[in-house]
Amino acid sequence: MIWRDPSDEERSLLLAVIVHHSNESEKDKFIIDLNSVVVADMQDGGMNSLRLAVKEPNGEIRSGDRFSRAICDLMSSDVDGIPVSLVINLDEDSNLFELDIWRVDYSPLHSVSVLKNNLRTTAGAE
């Protein structure tokens, strides 16, 4: 896996999604983690989903191996109006694991930057 710093629009989207998390103590931890988050592009057919990890001060990458639970289950729309699902997933140690992005028509995402502009919770989400 090739880790890199997130782009400004990716970091901005991650923050916009995380602030919707209802658990305040976890939300605060994840916002702090964003200062040292690194990302890896996922092979997801152009949806722009990201694997997430934290880069420690010593340069070591802290990344879990397995999905544990989903938080921040949100919806948005791409530039063409197609609904897009955005979910932050945590690993087995409750650390940031991935930002799962999925256009409901399975076509590639057109723009990451527009997604944060109309985020809304899904029915039954926390």
Image (cartoon, rainbow, N blue to C red):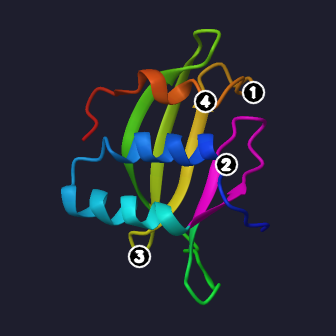
Q: Amino acid at mark 3?
A: Asp
Residue at point 33%, 45% (across, down): 19
Quadrant where the N terminus is found in the figure: bottom right
For label 2, the SS is loop
Q: Amino acid at mark 4?
A: Ser
Q: Nearer the viewer, mark 3 or mark 2?
A: 2
- Sooner in the amino-acid sequence: mark 1 or mark 3: 3
Total marks placed: 4
Quick check: is 112 in the magenta stretch? no
Residue 125 visible in the snapshot: yes
Q: Tell me the crowding category of disc 4: few under 14, some 14 to 19, or many 20 or more residues within 10 angstroms, Cα based.
A: some
- Sooner in the amino-acid sequence: mark 4 or mark 1: 1
For label 3, the SS is loop
**Residue corresponding to mark 1:** 108
Q: CA distance from mark 1 to mark 2?
A: 19 Å
**Residue corresponding to mark 4:** 113
User: In this rendering, would 94 be left or right of 108?
Assistant: left
